[in-house]
Amino acid sequence: MIAIIDYGLGNLHSVSKAVERLGYRAVVTSDKEEILRADGAILPGVGAYGDAMEFLRETGMDEAARAFAASGKPLLGICLGMQLLFSEGEEHGTHQGLGLLPGRVVRFKGEYKIPHMGWNRLEFRRDSALLTGLEEGHVYFVHSYHALPEQESDLIAVADYFQPVTAIVGRGNVMGMQFHPEKSGELGMQLLRNFLALAGAPAEASSSAASGQQS
């Protein structure tokens, strides 16, 4: 089972439907115990960094996310959810993040269109289980702030938007995608499939195996 962490913000429906299309059971939940029982968890998000962290703290989902990360099971942040994994964000003031990855989230600065919105090509920076069997291609971004990881080793892929923009990050079982994989065509779904594979076999495969053992 894959827990979609519900803290009052995020594209919960589209993410859960994408997970289900890939054969996994998705549960949108704000129950800490249910989250901790899950095989994998996804932290989605849209909106402002400070507001999101306030909602996480008010609902106790900040501690749930940290506890899940500490369990060693795969955790994925999507869009704002990825940004929240970092130490702090500067949107409308400085706000403390979840602190699962060292680094900060800053606003784009330059004489170009903000937000960064549209399809941009990924450039892979290092090997990762998220990239298994994949080639570089285009994914869909919508954001005005971008992450600056402190550790180069946490950077898995970037996209070019007048500068290298953090697109995929990962350290151990904690991973993030700045773009929306569920809205990024086949490549996005393949990336999501690779993340889900880290949580174990799909529900469909598990059901088939169980059925075979019973017959």
Image: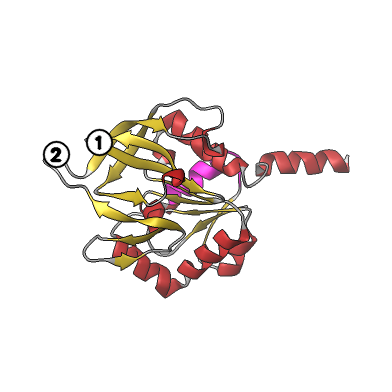
Which quadrant would residue 94 be assigned to in this image? bottom left
Q: Which mark is residue 45?
A: none
Q: How far across and how far down the image is residue 183, in percent?
A: 39, 38
**First to last magenta residue range:** 13-24
Q: Residue 132 location, x and y as percent?
A: 56, 31
Residue at 43% in and 63% down: 99
Q: Is residue 184 left or right of residue 28?
A: left
Which of disc 2 and disc 1 is earlier in sequence? Answer: 2
Position of the C terminus, as image quadrant, is: top right
Quadrant of the rendered image containing residue 72: bottom right
x, y percentage for residue 12?
Answer: 44, 53
Residue that carries the numbered disc 2 in the rendered image: 112
- Residue drawn at the location 51% of the way across and 40% of the way down: 192
| Alpha carbon separation for disc pair 1 and 2 | 9 Å
Q: Secondary structure at mark 2?
A: loop
Q: Is residue 212 above or below residue 75?
A: above
Q: In the rendered image, is residue 179 in sight?
A: no
Q: Amino acid at mark 1?
A: Tyr
Q: Which residue is mark 1?
A: 161
Is residue 187 at all visible to an observer of this figure?
Answer: yes
